[in-house]
Amino acid sequence: MKKILLFVFLLGYSAVFSQEFEFEKADFTEVSKSDIEALSDEGGLLLYDQKVELKVGGLNDMVTSFNLVHYQQYVASDSSAAAFQKVLARDPKDEHTVKQKLRIIKPNGQVVNFSNDSIKEFTNEQAGFVIHYFDVEGMEKGSVVEYVGIWSEDGVIDGVDVKLQSDVPVIKSKFELIYPDNIIIKMKAYNGLNTPVYNEEAYNGKSSYVVEHNNLEAMISNDEYTNLIKNIKFLRYKVDGIYGGVEKDFFNYKFFVDDFLAKRNRPLSNQELSVANDFYKKVRKSDNLMLSLRNIEFAIKSSVVISPEELKTLDRVISEHTGHLTDVLRLYDVMFKNLGVKYELVLTTKKNQQVYDASFPTRLNFTDALFYFPSLDAYMDPFSYEYFIPLSNTAYHHNQGLFVTTREFAGMETIAYDNKQLSLNTFETKDVFKAEVDLRNLNQVSVKTQHSISGERGIDFQKYFLLLNSNTIADFKNFLAKAYSNDATDFNIDVKNTSFDDYAIKPFVFNVNYKADHLFEQTEGAYIFKVGKLIGDQVRLEAEEERLWPIELTTAVDYKRTITVQLPKGYKVENLKDLNIHEKLKVDGKIVGEFKSSYKVKDDILSIDCIEIYDFVEIDKKYWQEYRTVINAAAVFNDVKLKFTAK
């Protein structure tokens, strides 16, 4: 209702709707030679200019957005020139395409213009989409590609993101928002982007915000363990109110919660309740609450496909096996009430796809909906076919979310909501590894290993066994055995806790026994045993000139490894001290990363203890070299070889 009122006020100030807008005559601009020199051999965008003008009125009495993208891209290499044989374009036949043009400025100064007649289309029938592109031939290294495109679309007033960085360097990046001067706009810049400049009288009867930022580095993913979406320079804006009309802070959390719950909490008819209750009766029951919830989750996900269709009754959702996501949430609600379990609805985002800003409420904060069960401290993703409760998708971990709770008081239903941080109890991986090595007969070395993995990575393994067919599972078991035996050829593997009922409740367990002759070498007067290979291949991070972004983990890890070696009689080990390795990373006085291996010998038994932990979500990029040293310590252990010589 409030959104309708906002449009009523907007229309009151816009009696006549005009198709004219401020940048309709936008055209090519001069290319700066100094900007080309600044890019050196990298290539990138000389200019990245974006404009949006909001217009109110028209036949549909709605907000229309006119948009401009104008870029100049320098082609610095032969490979880039090959990639620019096709330049993406809008469909020239689309009624919303206002204007677009392309030109190529060759190194010798020759200018080649491309009209809309040169636009072709490619249809991907399997994926179901059509791509339009300018067909460009003869692109040369050293050329400049310049594109101007203008189009219209329905205006968005409850939250828009504008990225000013790209996956290539940008010399000059600019964004301008133009809007009627009776509208109040709220805008925020992120990650060091220059502050937008407000101009109250930029145009006749219009205001504007302009932000410019030069010399932006490329947002590339060469940095390992990072979240680019979280670190990109961008701005966010929304309509915040109308002067003399709707109050400020229009799009607040109450607005979004009320709007969402008005759809989800539609009254259920007796017919809907009857069919939904019958559906619940068919769900497999368990004394374990986690498993009961998972059975409900599986029953709904295997029966109802999410579709963008109109809202409909629950009896139709169940009988037709399709439903709008809001209707599916209603079905879950009936199931949870039958089970008698309390839950909170969590509106949030995946942090690697969309930034959640609790201080700036917009619809962009609410791309995803989860369930949180306080009694289990566990989350459920009601729409993912890849994850089951307890949710282990760490893209949600440590992100913010709006927790919405329904409470009953004196027969009245009340709604409470609060921004809180999501903390997935599956984020930490605990990996316990034990190996027993028998070297008493140097001509027949055998190894027995036991692995127990819980948390995110253990659940990930269990997921494979739930989703793969029997033939693929056999291949996966062989892959596991080879990965944890350094490609042994004579092995057997036993896997446990892979059923639906075991998922995330019990740790994933697999034991590999194998002949380890391939880990043994005989040299003149000595035997060499590759003891470090017992823990499997380890990552080695190469040195970098400079770390660009903070270090972010997808899972915290706690490895505990124990290796017991039955030593051969008549031999001594010359280099046991190679097993003593210790590297650690401290942040604010706390050890958040550590690798430590040590040994002891008693009688003919060599015992090796090895711990490795990474206990953080995100740390500053200044710790990269120390973090790298800890990671590489495992690779150093991986290379340890024990040398046996006769006593």
Image (cartoon, rainbow, N blue to C red):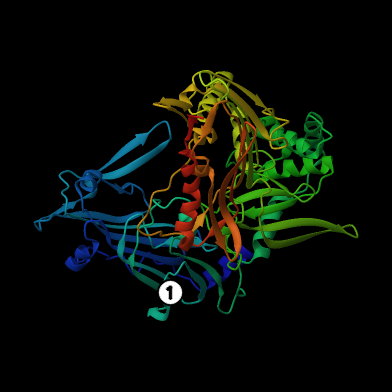
Is residue 155 something one can see in this rendering? Answer: no
**Quadrant in which the N terminus appears:** bottom right
Q: Quadrant of residue 508?
A: top right
The amino acid type of the residue labelled 1 equals Pro
The percent position of residue 84, horizontal first and vertical second, equals 24, 47
Above or below — where is 371 with respect to 549? above
| Residue placed under numbered mark 1 in the picture | 196
Taking the spot 56% from the left edge, 74% from the top edge, the residue there is: 242
| Residue placed furthest toward the right | 410
The percent position of residue 85, horizontal first and vertical second, equals 22, 44
Say which element carries label 1: loop
Taking the spot 42% from the left edge, 74% from the top edge, the residue there is: 208
Q: Is residue 250 left or right of residue 215?
A: right
The residue nearer to you, when weighing 300 against 379, is 379
Q: Is residue 46 left or right of residue 5?
A: left
Is residue 242 something one can see in this rendering? Answer: yes
Q: Is residue 437 left or right of residue 296?
A: left
The residue nearer to you, when weighing 54 against 84, is 84
The percent position of residue 517, horizontal first and vertical second, equals 49, 22
The percent position of residue 520, horizontal first and vertical second, equals 47, 26
Q: Quadrant of residue 24?
A: bottom left
The residue nearer to you, when weighing 459 against 186, is 459
Above or below — where is 57 with respect to 352? below
